[in-house]
Amino acid sequence: MRLPVLEDLPDVAGRRVLLRADFNVPLEDGRITDGLRIRAAMPTVRWLLDHGATVTACTHLGRPEGAPDPRFSVQPVRERLAELAPEVELLENLRFDPGETANDPAFVDRLVEGMDAYVNDAFGAAHRAHASIVGPPARLPSAAGRLLAKEVDVLLGLREHPKRPFVAVLGGAKVSDKLGVIGALLDVVDSLLVGGAMCFTFLAARGHQTGDSLVEPGQVDRCRRLLDEAGDKIVLPEDLVGLGPEGGVRTMGVDVPAGWKGMDIGPGTAADFSDRADAANTIFWNGPMGVFEDERFAAGTRTIAEAVAGARGFSVVGGGDSAAALARFRLDKDVDHVSTGGGASLELLERGDLPGLEALRGAPDAR
């Protein structure tokens, strides 16, 4: 995929550039708890400023309902950005206007008014056909920022030419959210290791008891077909850590008794998954193995995080809760690439394209 990059823009010296960033950072009591996404945009910001551009940035933050909401004001982001790049202006939360999510042309017109060029560095939002993502490239010379270009290069590299063996580890709550990417990954991986709550729908498809564990009954047949088609490519847990009706915690096999709920992969599974990750030349991880926020059920996710961080092969973590787990275990610096977009990374792996990328390729200056 050939995206227009910063060097493809017309000379930006003395020009006004609209930068769509992803500053959707976590907040607690109005304070930023993790500024990774702001720091990640700095290579693009510095390039634009060093080349003489006047930069106006825009972002969404949280999920306001198309109207101003002080809980989602970008003021904390504006203050942090001022510390890193005081020359950059930051617009108020894009989603305070319903035109953003509706891709309203009138809202796009207001965004690009007075602007000479557009740069999209918001990989975490590039899978949304929102006004600030797909609108400006139809009106202005446009380019992918450094972060967006790197994300695309790394993730499409996994999809198109991974070094083998290629092992993917998927977890998280809902299997329905990941069936598409599972199907796409099965075409390229050598092994797909399934943990997290999503494993219980697969285990149900294999006829195992799941107790009170999270199962999506409507997806059991689909999971059964995937297991039959994939053969031994899909690897399911061999033991689990469960929570009992009286609050007891114990390790068990893959059959969960009535009244019990599976909360984490067991130590045997964690060791097996870890060994497979260690033997991989490419490893991709998305989704925790259990309820890692509760220390009683954090061991599986911690083991996988350590395995991915210590893997000898090229390691990629698909953002979201996996990135949060890495940061919690202080392993985020030991992975080759931590994506800034959980949903976007999965959709790119599944489809090979995103609305934001398609829009950039159609920009007036795209070469």
Image (cartoon, helix red, strand yellow):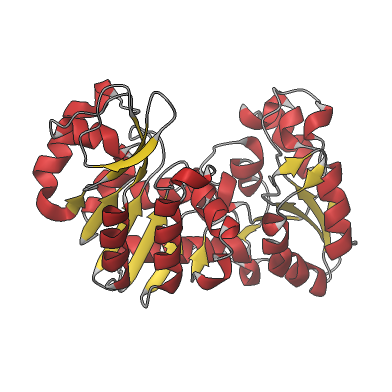
Q: Is residue 124 left or right of residue 271?
A: right
Kindly tell me whether residue 1 is visible in this rendering. Answer: no
- Which of the 4 image quarters holds residue 225? top left
Residue 342: x %, y % from top left: 50, 48
Q: Nearer the viewer, residue 152 or 239?
A: 239
Residue 287 drawn at (x, y percent): 43, 47
In the figure, 164 relative to 110: above or below? Answer: below
- Specify whether residue 140 is in view: yes
In this view, which residue lies farthest toward the bottom? 312
Residue shown at the point (32%, 54%) measured from the top left? 267
Does residue 125 lie above or below 277 as drawn?
above
* Position in image of residue 274 (x %, y %): 32, 64
Q: Where, by quadrant of the figure, is residue 248 drawn? A: top left
Horizontal arrangement in the rendering, residue 302 relative to residue 195 (left or right): right
- Residue occupying the point 21% across, 42% down: 253
**Is 329 on the left or on the right of 197, as rendered?**
right
Q: Quadrant of residue 8?
A: bottom right
Q: Is residue 235 shown above or below 207?
A: below
**Residue closer to the observer: 153 or 115:** 153
Q: Residue at x 31, y 64 (%)?
A: 160
Look at the image and tell me in which quarter the N terminus lies: bottom left
How many marks overall?
A: 0
Question: At which x and y percent is residue 187?
Answer: 21, 54
Identify which residue is drawn at 48% across, 61% down.
Answer: 152
